[in-house]
Structures are given as C-alpha cells and as structure tokens.
Amino acid sequence: MNDASKNSVDLNNLKTGGFIKERGKDLFTVRLRVPGGKLNVGRMKHIAEVAEKYGVESVHLSVRQSVELTHVHYKDFDGLVHDLEAGGQKVASCGARIRVPTACGGCAYNPNGLIDAQASAFEVDEKLFGKDTDHHKFKISFSGCPIDCFKSYLNDVGFQGVVYPALEKEACVSCGLCAKSCGAGAIEMGTDDKPVFDAEKCIYCGDCIKVCPTEAWTGSKRGYLVRIGGKGGHNPVLGTMFALFLPAERVVEFIDEVLTWYKGAGVGSGRTRLGTLIIQEGAESLLQHLRQKFGEFVPANSIVPQAINTQVGKFASGSASV
C-alpha cells in the first residue's frame, strides 16, 4: 500500500461515524455520544484529558446535547477514539441513522416533570442508536412535561410527558387553586363551588394536580404525547400528534414501527425526511400502520406535519429587496 492510499479518507464513512469535515485542511470535528445530555463528572474529566492530549483547545456544546471536539487531525482518529473509549466515552453518529436522543431532566429533579425522560432517552440510545433508516437522519427527543423544552414538534419523533387529571369531588375544599392555575381554561368553578373540568381544553399539563392541597386532583393516566414529522433547517416543519398517553415501556417498540413505515414509504424517494413523506402520503397512511399495534393510543385522525414559512413578509409591499 502506498502512502497516498494509507492517508486517504472516505468522508462518507467518517460522517456516518460522527466525524465532520471542517474548513481547515485535514481537520475534523469529532461528535461525542451523550444521550439525554447526561455526562458525569468523571467522564467530563476524561474527555478533557483526551482533548488536551490531541491538542484540542476547546469543545463545542451542540444544540442536541453533544460534546464536539474541534480541529482534530484525521491521523489522530484511531488514537483519539481508543483513548476516549478507555474512559467509557463513545463517538456519536451522523448520516442516515438514528441519532443520539436528547432529553430534559424529566422527573428526576424537575418539579414540572411528569415522566422519566432521561430513562427513555437512555433506553432508546441503548437499543436503537445508529440504526440505519435508509433515507435520512432520524432525530428523537424527550420532554418530561408540556413545557416541552426539547421541542417534540421539531424532531422526527418527539415525546412529551402528559397526565390526565381526575377529580374526587368529596375531597375538594373549593379553594379554586386548580382553576386559577389552569392556563388552558379547562377548569372553572361551578355554581356549587366545585371545579368543572372541560376535557376538550385540557393540555394534560398536570398543574391542577400539583397545586391541589388535598390531593382531590390525581392523575388517572400518564404517558407520552408523541409528535411525528418535525424538522428544522432551511424549510422547517412542525410535527403533529400521532399518539397520546403512550406508556414509557413501549417507546422503543413505537419508534421501531415508525421506522418500519418510513423505510417502506420512502423507497425510491432518495434523501427524504420523515415529515416530508407523511405530507406526501397523508397522515392516515402512518396512522393505519401504527393502529395495528398501538390502537388504544393512536388518535382517530390527525393532520400532516405543518411546513412553516419563516420568511413571512419577504415579499410584502415595502419590504427590502434581496
């Protein structure tokens, strides 16, 4: 093997492995695998030690909770990866694969948390990370409550924790805190000074349960609201709801079924994101597929993911010319 062949680099292989070409000659950014953004102090120290060994002066914290080592020379890849893995740190993936899932703190310490988003992210990372999608990148996020910090609607599949409130009127002391705390207007005080619940307006946030001093409000069921088809980029698309109160223990199975539909529907479409395919095929196609295994959680109908015009006003009268 001559020197040229030994030093050649297959950029496609590098990208699928979490190595991203930079502007500088022979330099790459190495993206590390940090599911749920959870990185213990020991591993942080190890990453810093390895970074210093290979001349990395700073890291970049990506919007998807990854740690990225910048300005790494391609000849250092083998040594860098070996040294990182010695301390339990693996490299992430790029390309047409399931990416590292992102997540908020869930109910581990966040008072708003309704479900363990961290546990879900770690399970998905363990069982599905790096799985081929055939068509394009596949991003997953977990938010522990309807504040939805991790933007379920901007991921290919996004999970948001929800709870359905139930009232035991006998335990209610008519304090009215539930009605005052309900930003959705789903609770009003009735003529008997007891709360009146409008299920159609409820967004399943659980605020009424948290403020109730007598525990008259409880959660009758909880799980994930699942939005599918979102993405950012040049032409953002908002994902829409395809499941409600999905149990945490069925998350991996659910993603697998979405991926099965995606692979089949996308045959011959080239590099096409999941949301684009749903728009082309119609929401009912995916809904029907999911009903086969998740009928009790899949709504009777939904709408396709919604494209957003982020340049509203560009062509309005008096706007600046481009």
Image (tube, helix red, strand yellow):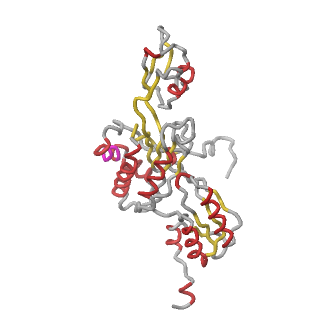
Q: Position of residue 262 (x, y in %)?
A: 38, 54
User: Residue farthest to the bottom?
Assistant: 2
Q: Position of residue 42 (x, y in %)?
A: 61, 59
The residues colored magenta run: 286-290
The residue depicted at 56 percent of the width and 52 percent of the height is 38
Residue 27 within the magenta-colored segment of the rendering: no
Q: Position of residue 217 (x, y in %)?
A: 46, 23
User: Residue farthest to the top?
Assistant: 191
Please count the marks in the image.
0
Please say if 198 is above or below 163: above
**Where, by quadrant of the figure, is residue 112 drawn?**
top right
User: Residue farthest to the left?
Assistant: 292
Q: Position of residue 245 (x, y in %)?
A: 40, 37
Q: Nearer the viewer, residue 187 or 268?
A: 187
Q: Nearer the viewer, residue 99 or 114?
A: 114
Q: Nearer the viewer, residue 127 or 60?
A: 127
The residue depicted at 63 percent of the width and 45 percent of the height is 314
Q: Name the dominant secondary structure of the magenta segment.
A: helix
Q: Nearer the viewer, residue 178 or 84?
A: 84
User: Residue farthest to the right?
Assistant: 57
**Where, by quadrant of the figure, is residue 72 drawn?**
bottom right
- Going by the image, does 130 lie left or right of 4? left
